[in-house]
Amino acid sequence: MVEYALEAISHAGTSLGIVSKEGVVLAAERRVSSKLLETRDLEKTYVLDDHVAVCVAGIVSDANTLVHYARSVAQNFEATFSEPMPVEQLVTRVADLKQGYTQFGGLRPYGVSMLYAGWDRNNGYQLYVSDPAGNFGAWRATCVGANAQTAQSMLKTHLAGPSGGSGADGADGPGADTHTSATSQDDAIELTLEDAINLSVKILCKTIESSNVTSEKLEIAVLTLHPVSKKPVFRALTREELDILIARIMAAEAAEKAAAEAEKAQQAARAASEAAAAIRANASGSGN
Amino acid sequence: MSIMSYNGSAMLAMVGRDCVAIASDTQLSANGQMISTDFQRVHMVNNNVMIGMSGLATDVQTLWADFRARTKMYKLREERDISPRAFAHMVSSALYQRRFGPYFIEPVIAGIDPDTKKPYVCSTDIIGCIEKSPNFVVAGTCTENLYGMCETLFRPDMDADDLFETVAQALVNAFDRDAYSGQGAIVHILTPTELITRTIKTRTD
Amino acid sequence: METLISLTGKDYVLTASDMTAARSILVFKVNEDKTRDLSPHITMAFCGESGDTVQFAEFIQKNIRLYAIRNNFELSPKAAANYVRTQLAESLRSRSPYAVNVLIAGFDEHEGPELYWLDYLGTLCKIPFGAHGFASNFVLSTLDNAYLPDMDLEQGIALLKSAIKVVQQRMLISQPNFQIKLVNKDGVSVIDI
């Protein structure tokens, strides 16, 4: 049964998350199936508490149930301890619920993978992924959904540090239960928030199966700390901000492509002239 | 001694022109013994609503933990802040659910309706019967004194500064004649745009 | 019949708990430990209905320990105090409530020294100094009179000594021994004064 759920998620729109020095980015492809469909600002991203948000991939109705469960758990914790719930604990609780549905017959597992972005006092900015089987792990940057492979390898090339970068290492797989803090010291390159947002747009532009990417097909949200109050703030990027970002990425890409073509042409020319020179040299050589 | 005066408290809420105020004493005593002069009975629910709870301190804390969780769930699901009126009914039903084994608190609720921008003030009894007032509500161990002061000092359509002066004078002079409450006061004034909080030093005998 | 006294200083909290176990007109022992450590940096002193006290304290102690094992980090003093409050408040409206009063002393790396006062009803209050028991009637006057915020350890110990002296001098009930615990950045320790 879990295999079917996993299969369903591999067809869902790509969702990705990146931890940066100044915040966590959640980005997702949204698939607008019809022009007649009413859309909201955030289609797949839900706030669970002031300091945790989640981006879901899979069956939306299942996700709604899980989101409601996670919200109640977080509120219950705060009512008992008078402190915000540590992110990993919340992730664990939801993962435990998911696991329960994989163990006994007659029940269908939740067909949802979730990307959690959070901040807490103990571990700072964090990113987690949980799958329908109840596996979860902490990540520097990762993704779920269709084209996850492509996105994952792009993240790896952009983020892996000198020693390969353990956080964005595909070998771990999104099922690996790493239990490490996402902000722990390792060699992966630490991005600024701006870089992380740009990178997420760049990757989504690649993975979305459409020739022209518009702001309607993307949703991006960031979890940061308020500069004055130092409390976590979650904000969705506006349509206009997305338009500007997409335009910039597209322009950069076009410029890159043009440069690559020019380079190719130049190389070809060089190769041709070298070949000509070689022939000439040969000819004169044989003449001797 | 009644369970309602075990911890001692005095508070009131009052309506001004486009503003509301809650004033409360800040002491916690238990059976007549002073425990702290810095106890919080008034809480901000959101930018439009505040609640003060008089009565048994443990129930104040238990219920605030509950109300905070419920209003947060409301906000997450509805994607908007709860209105003062809706919040008052939430408090009312939470209290009435314990009709035959009640929480020993009498809340006062004050807020500004986010849509109409009209001030809203009400109180309930310990089992949640709402009493909406056009001018002021009082609660605690010296309600007689508070009613007297409020009846004397209240004027309709006070601005935020006048309202502060009025509620502060009403509260301080009421609890100075009460053995169970006092030792400093805190006043919260809520306008459609801001929350002003002032603490008042009073006699500490 | 029992006495708990506690005060916070510049970078520490001191608790004093009497060590007498008595019932009716009989003293059973004078070396009873009325504290339990909830974590390396939190200790809880308790008094109240005998039977309830140790049962409740160890229930709390073991649940907070379980939390630390499960989640790989310790609860903050504030969270621990609120957890105890929740348990007492829930118990208050149960069929057989715990009649236990506690003082929770803790040290937090962000917040510094903290002291929480909790009664059997579940009333939680963060205080600079406080006491439980009959003796609180004398002790609080002594502390009110001489307490200063940011006292160093020497001054704190001197004040605690004078508070204990008042109890032993003025209270009808004999409490010959007090256990003193010190909580600071290095954790909880028992000290002689």
Image: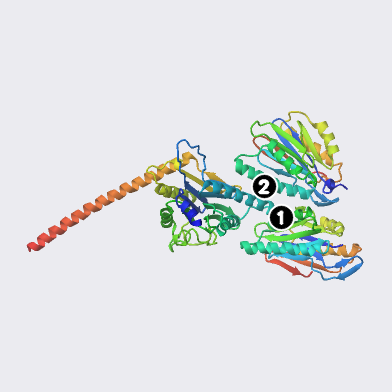
Q: Nearer the viewer, residue A274 or B124?
A: B124
Query: What chain does badge 1 belong to?
Result: C
- Please tell me how crowded label 1 is: few (under 14), some (14-19), or many (20+) other residues with Cα within 10 Å: many
Answer with the quarter of the image where residue C80 lies: bottom right
Q: In the rendering, at what x and y percent does residue B188 appear?
A: 72, 40
Q: Is residue C147 visible?
A: no
Query: What chain does badge 2 belong to?
Result: B
Three-letter code, disc 2:
Ala
Q: Which mark is residue C82?
A: 1
Q: In the rendering, at what x and y percent does residue B81 appear?
A: 63, 39
Answer with the quarter of the image where residue B164 lies: top right
How far apart are the alpha carbons under marks 1 and 2? 15 Å
- Please tell me how crowded label 2 is: few (under 14), some (14-19), or many (20+) other residues with Cα within 10 Å: many
Q: Nearer the viewer, residue C6 or C31?
A: C31
Left/right placement of residue A90 relative to residue B17 reads left
Is residue B96 depicted above or below B17 in this figure?
A: below
Three-letter code, disc 1:
Asn
Q: Secondary structure at mark 2?
A: helix
Is residue B47 depicted above or below C135 in this figure?
A: above
Q: Which mark is residue B69?
A: 2
Q: In the rendering, at what x and y percent does residue C141 appear?
A: 85, 56
Residue under the point 86% across and 43% down: B178
Q: Secondary structure at mark 1?
A: helix
Total marks placed: 2
Q: In the rendering, at what x and y percent does residue B144 appear?
A: 86, 37
Q: Nearer the viewer, residue A104 or A133?
A: A104
Q: Nearer the viewer, residue B204 or C176?
A: C176
Q: Is residue B128 visible?
A: yes
Farthest residue toward the front? A106
**Which quadrant of the rendered structure holds the C terminus of chain A?**
bottom left
